[in-house]
Image: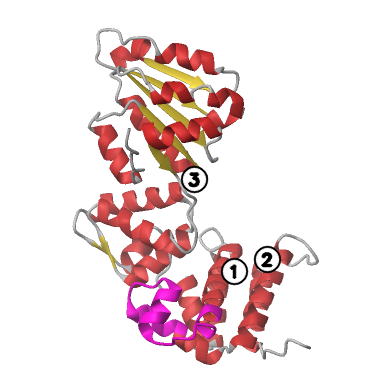
Amino acid sequence: MAAVPALTYASLCQSIKKSALSPVYLLHGEESYYLDELMKLFEETVPAEERAFNLYVLYGHGTSSAEVLDACRRFPVMADRQLVLLKEAQSMNANEVNKLAEYVRHPNPTTTLVLCFRGAAAKGKDLIGACKTSAVVFESKKLTDRNIGPVLEGLIREVGLNIEPKGLSMLKEYVGTDLAKLHNEINKMALVLGKGAMITPESIERNIGVSKDYNNFELIDALAVRDAAKAFTITRYFRSNPKNNPGTLTAAALFGFFSSLMIMHFTRDKSPSSLMGALGLKWQSQLSRYETGARNYNAYRTIEIISAIRNFDRKSKGVGSRLNEYDLLDELIFRILAARGDLGV
């Protein structure tokens, strides 16, 4: 049998909602949010009145492969298909999991088996090999600061909205890589703004509570041009609004910015297209803040600043300091602005 290509989350959701089901699915990966949502969708394919007969929900802990196979080999009751969900499959040992491989290669055509390794990579060499050629495989990868932008843009398009570049940066910094929070905020904006609307910094401030003037995006812009007055005005606002502006999130945003400056400094081809590719930027207008930052913070200063950010992270966890995170943040901003790049000192 020819290998079945792994599907994207959106495509997989669409096929499940249409009840266009395959005999076997393997769901795995570090990001649990997508896996949980997919399992809910699978359950919804079985009508409520049929679930007592045609839906089997098993859990890896305390379940043997024999029990899974027994459920799979039954026949649906007054329906065309039954559904067998093995949740928390990561709790089964590899030997037990491998015993499912032969079934995966020759599944019951009236059963859909879903194997879900929640928050972990699939295990069992034999099972994985069988799934590569005889199952639909979806890996739910953990979001990173580098790939959150495209994912966020995709979700915004899916709900029929558009977004300005600054608004995208604000949402990225506010949401971080928390997928559940990301989906929640995007759905909230879709409900409030309506299809076809543009997400602007003003609408984010109005509906989510992130200030369009006092946020990590504006703080980085202020630091890029070495505007100390504006930078400390923003951190004072953060101190008075700690719920929406945790110091650790600000430090993460600063680390991302200055790490990008390091990439700029050591990218040989300084053409806009080359730098945009190296930094993962979509619009050339986004490049200006990095170009300004690179002019004001040479490579040595940038190395010193990254070290200061790491020191902030250590102290904010209570190691070597009793200051609160906003006192530490002010100290960090001072060290950024005062950095000389004297690494030997």
Residue 24 appears at what percent x and percent y?
37, 28
User: Residue at (66%, 87%) from the top-left corner?
Assistant: 339
Which image quadrant: the N terminus? top left
The answer to which quarter of the image holds residue 94 is top right
Q: State the residue position of label 3.
A: 31
Identify the magenta region: 262-290
The answer to which quarter of the image holds residue 92 is top right
Q: State the residue position of label 1.
A: 251
Q: Residues within 10 Å of mark 2 (few under 14, many from 20)?
A: some
Secondary structure found at label 2: helix
Secondary structure found at label 3: loop
Q: State the residue position of label 2.
A: 313
- Is residue 267 rendered magenta in the image? yes
Question: Is 78 situated left or right of 271 in this image?
Answer: left
Residue lying farthest to the front in this orientation = 1
Residue 222 appears at what percent x and percent y?
49, 83
Rendered view: 287 above or below 198: below
53 or 266: nearer the viewer: 266
Rendering colour mode: secondary structure
| Magenta: main secondary structure | helix
Q: Mark 1 and mark 2 in contact? Answer it, CB < 8 Å.
A: yes
Residue 156 appears at what percent x and percent y?
30, 56
Name the amino acid, label 1: Ala
